[in-house]
Image: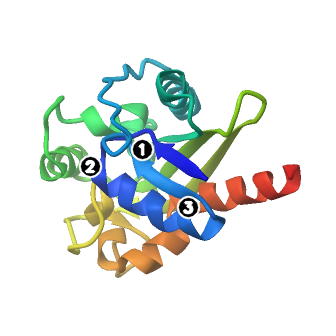
Amino acid sequence: MKVIIATKNEGKVREFRKLLLPLGFEPVSMTEAGVEADITEDGETFEENAHIKAKAVRELTGSPVIADDSGLEVEFLGGAPGIYSARYAGENATDEQRNQKLLEEMQGAELPLRNARFVCAIYFILDDKREYCVTGVLDGYIGEEPKGEHGFGYDPVFMIDDDTSLAQVGEDEKNKISHRARAMEKLAEVIKAKE
C-alpha cells in the first residue's frame, strides 16, 4: 500500500522509508506524489502539528498519509526549542547554525541541566475510519561540541552516552534506537492490534 510521507525533509523521508518498508508499505515523498503544498504548522504540541500535516496532505490526495512532528526538548532551556526546533536559529538557518545557537545557550550548564530528549509524534491516516497517533522519546543530553558525520538536525550535539553522539552511530543503528523508530514501533503495534 502506498503511503505519502508528509514532509519535505529528505533526512526524515530516508528514515521513514527504512522504517515503513518492513511493515509492508510503499512510502513516497510529497514531491514524488506531486504535492507542493506549504503547510502551516500552528499547533501547540508535536501531536497537533503532526495531525495538521497529515490531514492537509490527506485532503489534497485522498491517499494514506503519515506525518510526524519532532524536535528537541532541553531541560536547561525549559523544554525549548520544542516544537520550534527547526526554526530555532531563524527560518532559513542550517543545522550547523541551530546547533551553534543551542551550544551557546548551554554554556556553563552542567549535568543534569544538560539533559535532553528527542520527541517524535507520528500521525497516520490510513483511511476515513482509521487514524492513529503515537509518540516516541529518546533520552540523552547535550554535549559540549558537535561530534559525528551521520544523521541530521541536532544529532551531532545529542549524546546518547558519555562518548557517543547520535551523529556517530550509523543509520541502521539510529533506526533502531531513535525517537522516530520508537514511535514507529508503537505504530506498528497499534496497526497490528486493530487488524
Do the CB atoms of the residues marked 1 and 3 lie less than 8 Å apart?
A: no
Q: Which residue is mark 3?
A: 20
Checking the image for residue 152, the label placed there is none
Measured as percent of width and height from the top left, residue 173 is found at 46, 79
Q: Position of residue 176 (x, y in %)?
A: 54, 74
Q: Is residue 11 left or right of residue 176?
A: left
Of 169 and 31, which appears nearest the observer? 31
Label 3: state its secondary structure. helix
Q: Which mark is residue 106?
A: 2
Asked whether, in this view, residue 43 is left or right of residue 163, the answer is right
| SS at circle 1 | strand
What's the coloring here? rainbow
Q: Who comes first in sequence, dot 2 or dot 3?
A: 3
Residue 184 location, quadrant: bottom right
Q: Residues within 10 Å of mark 1 (few under 14, many from 20)?
A: many
Tell how many labels.
3
Which is nearer the eye, 150 or 158?
A: 150
Q: Is residue 157 visible?
A: yes
Q: Residue at x 20, y 73 (%)?
A: 149
Q: Is residue 143 visible?
A: no
- The structure residue drawn at horizontal position 43% and vertical position 17%, both measured from the top left corner, is 42
- Measured in 3D between alpha carbons, the distance from the residue under mark 1 to the one under mark 3, in whole angstroms, is 20 Å
Which comes sooner in the sequence, label 1 or label 3?
A: 3
Q: Mark 2 or mark 1: which is in front?
A: 1
Residue 116 x, y percent position in the rendering: 45, 53
Q: Which mark is residue 71?
A: 1
Towards the viewer: 116 or 64: 64
Q: Looking at the image, is 32 positioned above or below residue 22? A: above
